[in-house]
Amino acid sequence: MKTDVLKVERAEVDEDRRTIERAVQSEYKYGFVSDLETDEAPKGLNEDTIRFISGKKNEPQWMLDWRLRAYQLWLKMEEPLWANVKFEPIDYQDIIYYSAPKQKISLNSLDEIDPELRRTFEKLGISLDEQKRLSGVAVDAVIDSVSIATTYKEQLAELGIIFCSMSEAIQEHPALVQKYLGSVVPVTDNYYAALNSAVFSDGSFVFIPKDVRCPMELSTYFRINAENTGQFERTLIVCEDKSYVSYLEGCTAPMRDENQLHAAVVELVALDNAEIKYSTVQNWYPGDKEGKGGIYNFVTKRGICKGINSKISWTQVETGSAITWKYPSVILKGDNSIGEFYSVAVTNNHQQADTGTKMMHIGKNTRSRIVSKGISAGFSNNSYRGLVHIGKTALNARNFSQCDSLLLGDKCGAHTFPYIEVKNQSAMVEHEATTSKIGEDQIFYCNQRGINTETAVALIINGFAREVMSQLPMEFAVEAQKLLAISLEGSVG
Amino acid sequence: MLSIRNLHAAIDGKAILKGINLDIRPGEVHAIMGPNGSGKSTLAAVLSGRADFEVTDGTVDFLGKNILELSPEDRAGEGIFLAFQYPVEIPGLTTTNFIKTAVNEVRKYRGEAPLDAVQFLKIMKEKMALMNMDQSLLSRPLNEGFSGGEKKRNEIFQMAMLQPKLAILDETDSGLDIDAIRTVSNGVNTLRNKENAVLVVTHYQRLLDYIVPDFVHVLYNGRIVKSGTKELAFVLEERGYDFIKNAVNEGQEA
């Protein structure tokens, strides 16, 4: 293992390995399609599409105006091309921007959910039945463009916590939505964020009032089902003074030959002494082993530590998607605030990932910690891209970054692009990076102890990713470990 | 229990083992000695199923099975254990997790139920005491940052946990001071019984002061050129490997 400090590095593998070779794609477990009757917008994007979406949701005028403004701005913007990924240009007129499973307009209880929908979520291991659910986790289930159900709403409401779909929040809590929507990721932030602002259809809204620690994990489960559909969800989490929430999102999609676009925006706001822990287990369909199909996961996630002593922590386990373009970031505005980013990104076959974070230090004594673990196999390309910015006002800011890459086989690539901008001399910024390979020696050592190669790879991978996996909520850590092993199945043979 | 007949093996087309014959019965300790490059470690690697080596001729029968047809993990399941000369590090994987997985995989192979956490912990504590191991090693990543002595002790600890029928110790004494040799040997001796056997691969005689062999074989240029009892090791220690080499090169029995 070698350690390089402050160096952009690129590691390609040499060709002398016998045991470790590229191999077969494992089965994607969530690739089924549910037969749901849907209500769709016509293909393509123009002002009418946006009016259609807004109309479907019976939105107030201010929301429609916001969308239309975003659309006008988007028309003038250009797709970012700086990421280390390659793909054919997206035809934005060939996408369906709104698709909703048909069901009764309003549900009186969770029992009224369409049985086919319920089965879909059960197949995914998500029970919408509160009694049967893993206790202590509330779920918002989003399929294609709409939220299907949210569990535990009443119990949470007793504490003043709002956990509902974004559509409902726009109707029921317009003041909060108007105050915070777009306050962290402005409409013009980037091409995909602008697109999302114009056409977003649903997502989750969380509000934790002052002095409340949310007593259970909140989670949203995203599923793309319909063909030719893009998913554009919008999530907003606001934590008032001295409040706390731990939130988790999971995602899957059917196996399809064409690429599908997923362009989400997530905004987090933490006020004085508040803490938000946001975890993602991303398992969108990655495409087949030749690189056909799969989700383009172009996502903007950002949180602001607005208040003093606040904390935002991102944890992500990224195993799916054909292409991932995503940089969950933290603006450290409040003095003494803390930003964290823990990431495991796995790419296999022809997957491409360009992911990392931005830590923007503004307040005094702000601290950030970045731990990124990239695992590449097959013909994939896995890049870490991160920015640590220490502003003029950020007295005594601290950052520590650790970026490790693990390579399986000799056809994949691992890349690290750390950017550091320091405008205050009191700052202390550390960056460490390593690149290693799973050795034949390691696998043989496990084999000799009776452990087969698949299990050996899983052990080695989980060891490599341990620091990040240990950040996940208990309920999901085991699942995520299995997911890592499944994503790499057959990549060592 | 182990019967090696006319074993030939090569790496990258280069012949290393050139007709090994060896029989090991339950309860016996055999030592393989020989100068550097004679093929000692290759023999250990071939028996445990390392893929770098190609077996070009011969058979290896272990308890009635042709193990050359088995994968390394299945050989481990059958009861073959290799204590590595250079134990491998696996960052982030705790020693406990590794050993628990190994023990349960081997149990699965043998059709036994996996040990639960409580049972496993109890056995682990017993074996740790035997090897005089520091408990903190078990929560540390496998072999990462371990000293040479700790790594070798960890090998024998794993042997104690897996209870193999045939343990192959590949240069287990290399890099160890005398106290560590004593601890490691003590561990091996405690694990010996009438049903299992040990094959000690070593360059030096000193390990054999502690793990006393029933038979000593001298390997030179890919063949066993001389076999004897433990006294043969003393002769080698006194006269060096040169007298064997000379004897072989002159075409006569040493």
Image: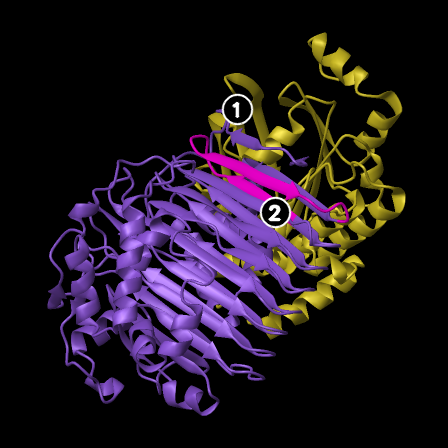
Chain colours: A purple, B yellow
Numbered marks: total = 2
Please report the residue visible at 39 percent of the width from the left and 53 percent of the height from the top. A299
Q: Answer with left or right where residue B155 lies relative to residue A198.
A: right
Tell me where residue A65 appears, x and y as whole percent: 27, 64
> Residue A405: within the magenta?
yes
Q: Residues under labels 1 and 2: Cα distance?
A: 59 Å
Identified by mark 1, the residue type is His
Q: Nearer the viewer, residue B5 or A274?
A: A274
Q: Secondary structure at mark 2?
A: strand
Q: What span is in magenta?
A: A401-426
| Residue at x 48% of width, y 28% of height | B58
Image position, residue B131 (x, y; %): 77, 57
The numbered dot on residue B8 is 1
Left or right side of A27 for B250:
right
> Label 2 is found on which chain of the structure?
A
Dot 1 and dot 2 residues touching (CB under 8 Å): no
Question: Which element type, helix, strand or loop, lies under badge 1?
Answer: strand
**Considering the image in quadrants, where does the C terminus of chain A appear?**
top left
Q: Is residue B228 above or below residue B221?
A: below
Marker disc for residue A272: none
Quarter of the picture holding the N terminus of chain A: top right
* Camera-nearest residue between A277 and B187: A277
Q: Is residue A90 left or right of residue B166?
A: left
Instruction: Report crowding for label 2: few under 14, some 14 to 19, many 20 or more residues within 10 A (C-alpha).
Output: many
Chain for numbered disc 1: B
Q: Is residue B193 magenta?
A: no
Location of mark 2 (residue)? A388
Amino acid under disc 2? Val
Q: Taking the image as drawn, is residue A138 in sight?
A: yes
Image position of B248 with respect to A182: above or below: above
